[in-house]
Amino acid sequence: MEVEIIKMDNLGRGIGYLNNKIIFVPKTFPGDIVEVEITLEKKNYLEGKIKKIITPSKKRIKPLCPYFFKCGGCDLMHISLSEALSYKLDKVNAILKKNKISYEVKKIIKSKEQYNYRNKLTLKIINNEVCFYEPETHLPLKIDYCYLANEKINNLLKDLNKLNIQNGNVTIRTNYKGEILLICESKQELANKEWLIHNYPIVGIVHNGKCLYGEDYLMDQINDYLFKISYDSFFQVNPYICSELFNLISSNTEDSLKVLDFYSGVGTLSIATNKNVQKTLGVEIVSNAVRDANLNKVINKRDSLEFIESDAKKVKDKITSYFDTIILDPPRSGVSKDVIQKIKEENIAKIIYISCNPQTLGRDLNLLLDKYAIKEFILLDMFPNTEHVESFCVLKHM
């Protein structure tokens, strides 16, 4: 069945029409004419996948990765970087418009590296082979290289089978020195650890939550800051864009005296606040991340910081007029309504909202803009070759 792609959706899929129904086709771009195979049929729409590209869009390029059409990791490697950046700007602006927000985002900060930027990669091990899953399935896709991952990670991929994991998960993290932290989950004991330690710059191996070698954390550096990152703590995957994010945080807290940092992780954004801030309180639910944050404030000589372990929803009483700025960096699900309501009730002067999900950001902004005005909105290309984008938004009380 032949489909002409006419536009893109918010998940990076091409949109066309087939038998008077809308159809979503990943890995396509406006101008493509493709033969498709239907993978899902619903009352109001269809989903499909490419069987053959009949006539490619003039803007289509050849993807570098040989796994592109089978792997779910990349959505946009078939178009140029400039087209991908334009798509991300258009997508976010369309989401804002859908949420009745009359603001146009015009700036996106490019990643320094278009490829090999990720400092963390999580893999499936199936029958002792390194795999990703094919999109929306549990079908294994054997790989030996990922164009998004740091080269230190890719170098290790070819020898992961020496661990003799028949089935499980492996996460590889690396830092600014090229050191590696290996995190494994499996029922089998790990084999050949000594060989891997001898041949790779491995500083720690964690198996099923237990440290078998070295340390269960990495030290990483962004700008002039050093951070301890435990094996299960969140840290941004693109160091260059993380550095740019830190610069934005610092420049937008120059006039802040007391800052509340919800979803504070290992303390990165709290530490990145302007050094003239008199008091910063960070709230984080992951216990290892809180321990890391309390060490990171000592390493970076930020005595004005305090971190507590809690679910943000359970400590909304911490949101008081004592704080003039609140930083929100929530998971993809966004900020709960009761937290938003408490922010509005306390008339917090400034909100810095960092989001990896424009959909929930648009929803939350819609709830805030009766009391707040957008003063700055910048996108950061944290995840090149994918449909994902990071948003940095500053709101001030009206």
Image (tube, grey):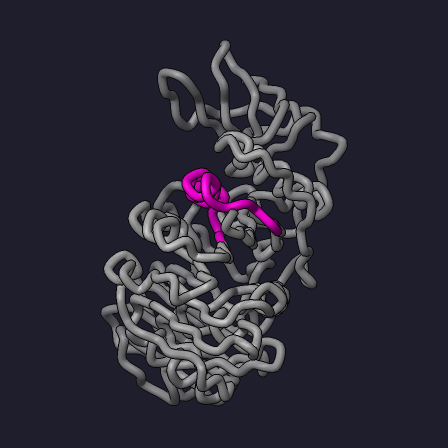
Between residues 160 and 44, which one lies in front from this camera angle? 44
Between residues 240 and 76, which one lies in front from this camera angle? 240
- In the image, 309: left or right of 148? left
Q: Position of residue 39 (x, y in %)?
A: 42, 28
Residue shown at 64%/43% (left/top)? Answer: 105
Magenta-colored span: 355-377
Between residues 32 and 336, which one lies in front from this camera angle? 336
Q: Position of residue 18 (x, y in %)?
A: 52, 15
Q: Identify the image quadrant of the N terminus.
A: top right
Above or below residue 302? Residue 148 is above
Above or below residue 252? Residue 219 is below
289 part of magenta stretch: no
- In the image, 353: left or right of 334? right
Residue shown at 64%/59% (left/top)? Answer: 115
The answer to whether residue 150 is visible is no
- In the image, 223: left or right of 329? right
Residue shown at 50%/22% (left/top)? Answer: 23
Residue shown at 53%/83% (left/top)? Answer: 226
Above or below residue 366? Residue 331 is below
Q: Position of residue 331 (x, y in %)?
A: 39, 55
